[in-house]
Each structure stands twice: as C-alpha cells, then as structure tokens.
Amino acid sequence: MNMDERIARINVLYHKSRNEGLTEEEKEEQARLRKEYVASVRANLRGQLDNITIERPDGSKENLGEKFGNKKHHT
C-alpha cells in the first residue's frame, strides 16, 4: 500500500468513525495506518534536514546532517 492509498484509507476510516463507528479491527487498522504515516513524515523530514548545508560568512560550508544527523532524536 503506497502513501496515497494509506491516506485515503485513513480518511475513509475517519469518516466512518464519525458516522457509524468502527469495529475493533478497524480501530486497530486506523491506529496502525496513522502510526505508519507519522513515521513516514518524520523520516522524510529527517532526510530533508540531514541534507541542509549552510554557508558561513567566511565561505566555509557545513553540512548539518553530518554534524547533527547521527545523534539520537526524541520521537
């Protein structure tokens, strides 16, 4: 299931929960899909942040991913 399909399914389950309620299996599926979605967003953001390079006034460049990327992050 790709991300677009996951988002569509999350939305279907959300609307169903509002209109008629979810079964326990659907609640578990919804929680799992949301968790996968959040993990994907965090991984994408981390990938973008790890590729940021700043240029100092003296012309030197510093890759922030190399500087901070290997540290443990709170999730």
Image: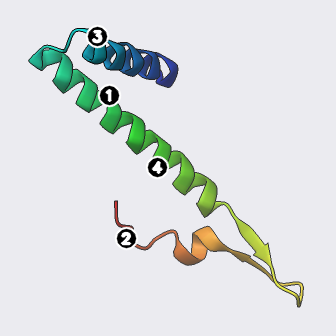
Judging by the rendered image, the residue that carries numbered circle 1 is 33
Is 65 in front, or is 33? 33
Can residue 1 be seen at all in this image of the molecule?
no
Is 34 in front, or is 48? 34
Res 42 label: 4
Seen at 60% across and 62% down, the residue is: 50
Residues at circles 1 and 2 in contact by the CB criterion of under 8 Å = no
Seen at 29% across and 17% down, the residue is: 18
> What element does badge 3 sit on?
helix
> What element does badge 2 sit on?
loop
- Circle 2 packing at 10 Å, graded few (<14), some (14-19), many (20+), is few
Whichever of callouts 4 and 1 sits on the residue coming sooner in the sequence is 1
Q: Amino acid at mark 3?
A: Asn
Horizontal and vertical percent for residue 46? 53, 56
- Distance of mark 3 from mark 1, alpha carbons? 20 Å
Whichever of callouts 1 and 2 sits on the residue coming sooner in the sequence is 1
Judging by the rendered image, the residue that carries numbered circle 2 is 72
Q: Nearer the viewer, mark 4 or mark 2?
A: 4
- Distance of mark 3 from mark 4, alpha carbons? 30 Å
Residues at circles 2 and 3 in contact by the CB criterion of under 8 Å = no
Res 19 label: 3
- Distance of mark 2 from mark 3, alpha carbons? 41 Å
Residues at circles 4 and 2 in contact by the CB criterion of under 8 Å = no
